[in-house]
Amino acid sequence: MTDVHYRAPLIEDAGALAAFGRETFIDTFGHLYSAANLNAFLDRVHGLPAVAAELADPARAYRVAEVDGALVGYAKIGPMSLPVANPPATALELKQLYVLPAYKGQGVAATLMAWALDQCHARGARDVYLSVYADNPRAQAFYRRHGFTIVGHYKFMVGDHADDEDIMHLQLWD
Ligand SMILES: CC(C)(COP(=O)(O)OP(=O)(O)OC[C@H]1O[C@@H](n2cnc3c(N)ncnc32)[C@H](O)[C@@H]1OP(=O)(O)O)[C@@H](O)C(=O)NCCC(=O)NCCS
């Protein structure tokens, strides 16, 4: 397989990351939503201003995977925003993890996950949470393999459309 290079993105990468986030979200989930709901969500979450602000935020961290200088995947961690009752103050969230279809099953996502868990550990988090669409069996299997278990459910809003999401949790140490 082609060499995959991993690095921390710079603020100059905001445009490429925003475009990649939009494209991968549309490829994976676009069929679930109306155009109005999808565009509202993409502008809010994967718009250039949002991505640039998050890249500049020290409470968040990104890792990108590239092949020949082009993005093939990324992961992002940051503060808890999931509706979990009384999470530990140090808990962190794996907020996004995407790889291009051609790079699924190639270990790229596993390398990004290893980075995400190392980052959470280095930032003092014992508890890591994430949310996953309830009908995304591939992602759920991947997260289970990395030790996450389902601890709750909530409605994830895409525009005015509510999706069923599972909240998953991993305790990094006792
Ligand atoms: C989720 C994602 C990051 C996982 O990376 P990946 O490289 O595909 O993961 P892997 O191939 O290592 O593992 C996938 C697991 O799902 C299993 N799987 C594959 N297709 C499946 C399916 N249709 N149903 C159930 N399980 C499936 C694989 O066998 C593997 O399980 P195993 O480790 O027990 O053998 C990647 O698929 C992705 O980017 N998906 C699109 C975006 C996305 O859904 N992101 C997560 C949002 S929460």
Image (tube, helix red, strand yellow):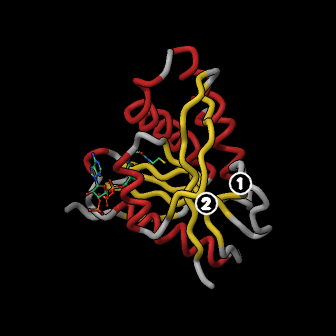
- Quadrant for the N terminus in the image: bottom left
Q: Quadrant of residue 121?
A: bottom right
Mark 2 Cα within 10 Å, few/some/many (few <14, many 20+)?
many
Residue at the left extreme, as displayed: 1
Q: Is residue 102 above or below residue 145?
A: above
Which secondary structure lies at badge 2?
strand
Residue at (35, 61) in percent of width and height = 108
Mark 1–mark 2 contact, CB under 8 Å?
yes
- Closest to the observer, 102 or 127: 127
Q: Is residue 72 visible?
A: no
Quarter occupied by residue 159? top right
Question: Can residue 80 be seen at all in this image of the molecule?
Answer: yes
Under 8 Å from ligand 1: the CB of mark 2?
A: no
The image quarter containing residue 171 is bottom right
Task: Indicate which label's residue lies in the foreground, 1 or 2.
Answer: 1
Residue for point 43% across, 68% down:
146
**Front-most of 154 and 44?**
154
Residue under label 1, please give it: 84
Please give the name of the residue rendered at 50% of the width and 40% of the height, measured from the top-left corner.
21
Residue 26 pos. (x, y %): 43, 30
Mark 1: secondary structure: loop
Query: Which residue is labeled 2 in the image?
Result: 129
Quadrant assignment for the C terminus: bottom right
Above or below residue 160? Residue 117 is below
Side (left or right) of 146 relative to 87: left
Rendered position, 136 above or below 27 = below
